[in-house]
Image (spheres, grey):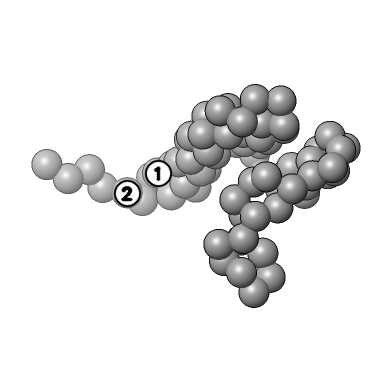
Amino acid sequence: MLAWPTQGNPGGFISFEKLTDCGAFVESFAFAARIPEIVRAKYGRELTLYLLGWVDFSVLKAGELAALIALELALMDRYGGQATKSD
């Protein structure tokens, strides 16, 4: 069971019967090829950790952290030159 918003139920849960179902769900979040390779690689770690969550639920939090790091990298890659450092 995984806490995940579903149609009409933002506090819903989803479950997977087989590992292949979980893998298909995780793979549906993969980035497009137009995203820089380094960002896709870092985000790919998040996808791997989510898939490992099938075996050990505790790694899902590490997957969320990896996703946030990939998001930060993508934002810095795209907008880093426009950001100003404040004192």
Place of residue 8 in the rendered image (x, y in percent of width and height, measured from the top left): 64, 74
Say which mark, if any, is on residue 80. Answer: 1
Q: CA distance from mark 2 to mark 1?
A: 5 Å
Q: Does residue 34 appear in this view? A: no
Residue pictured at 55% horizontal, 62% vertical: 11
Viewer-closest of 41 and 36: 41
Would you name the residue on which mark 2 appears?
Answer: 83
Q: Amino acid at mark 2?
A: Ala
Q: Which of the 4 image quarters holds residue 37?
A: top right
| Label 2 packing within 10 angstroms: few (<14), some (14-19), many (20+) | few
One can see residue 74 in this view: yes
Which residue is at the front of the view, 82 or 32?
32
Q: Between residue 85 and residue 61, name the one nearer to us.
A: 61
Q: Kindly check if marks 2 and 1 are in contact, taking CB atoms under 8 A apart as contact.
A: yes
Q: Kindly identify which numbered label has been placed on residue 22.
A: none
Quadrant for the C terminus in the image = top left
- Element type at marker 2? loop
Q: Quadrant of the N terminus?
A: top right
Q: In the image, residue 65 lies at what x, y percent?
A: 48, 34
Residue shown at the point (79%, 44%) measured from the top left: 16
Determine whether, in the image, residue 5 is placed left or right of residue 66. Answer: right
User: Which quadrant holds residue 26?
Assistant: top right
Q: Amino acid at mark 1?
A: Gly
Residue name at image x 84 percent, y 42 percent? 17
Seen at 57% across and 66% down, the residue is 10
Tell me residue 41's x, y (percent): 66, 30
- Outermost residue, left direction? 87
